[in-house]
Image (tube, rainbow, N blue to C red):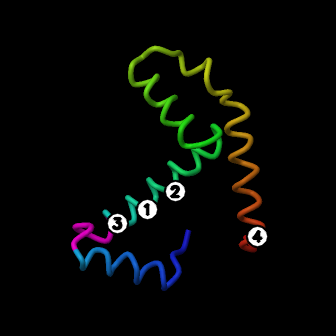
Amino acid sequence: MTLSPEDAFDLQARVERGEFSSLEEAVAAELAELNYRRAAEIVGGSEKLESLLDELEAEVVDPAECVDAEAFFSEMLTDLKARAEAAGE
């Protein structure tokens, strides 16, 4: 994955403003946000994701009952292939 110059500049500016202690921390935070948004998209929205996370944290549910791993990974693979094709890779 390559950051655009604009995104790199934005992250560096956020570090300089004190939002993050380092560029590495800023990139990690952005990746975590991206992963969160993707997970929310997969389960049907942020409310459903938060509910699922709350239930998992309380150990009330068996994760195998909530997520079809095969469908989840198949969808992710399809998305990654589409992104790679769009990027010319």
Image quarter for residue 84? bottom right
Amino acid carrying label 3: it is: Ala
Secondary element type, mark 2: helix
Q: Earlier in the sequence, mark 4 or mark 2?
A: 2
From the image, which quarter does the N terminus lie in? Answer: bottom right
> Which residue is under mark 2?
34
In magenta segment, residue 33? no
For the point 65% across and 42% down, the residue is 42
- Left or right: 5 as drawn, with respect to 73: left
Amino acid carrying label 2: it is: Leu
> Which residue is under mark 3?
26
Mark 4 touching mark 2, by CB under 8 A? no
Mark 1 touching mark 3, by CB under 8 A? yes
Mark 1 touching mark 2, by CB under 8 A? yes
From the image, which quarter does the C terminus lie in? Answer: bottom right
Give the x, y percent position of residue 72: 68, 37
Q: Earlier in the sequence, mark 3 or mark 2?
A: 3
Secondary element type, mark 4: helix
Whether 58 is drawn above or below 74: the answer is above
Amino acid carrying label 4: it is: Ala
Give the x, y percent position of residue 82: 77, 60
How far apart are the two marked residues, 4 and 3, measured between alpha carbons? 26 Å
- Left or right: 7 as drawn, with respect to 29: right
Give the x, y percent position of residue 19: 26, 68
> Which residue is under mark 4?
86
Q: Where residue 30 is drawn, which disc sits there? A: 1
How far apart are the two marked residues, 3 and 2, measured between alpha carbons? 12 Å
Single out the mark in the foreground, 4 or 2: 2
Mark 4 touching mark 1, by CB under 8 A? no
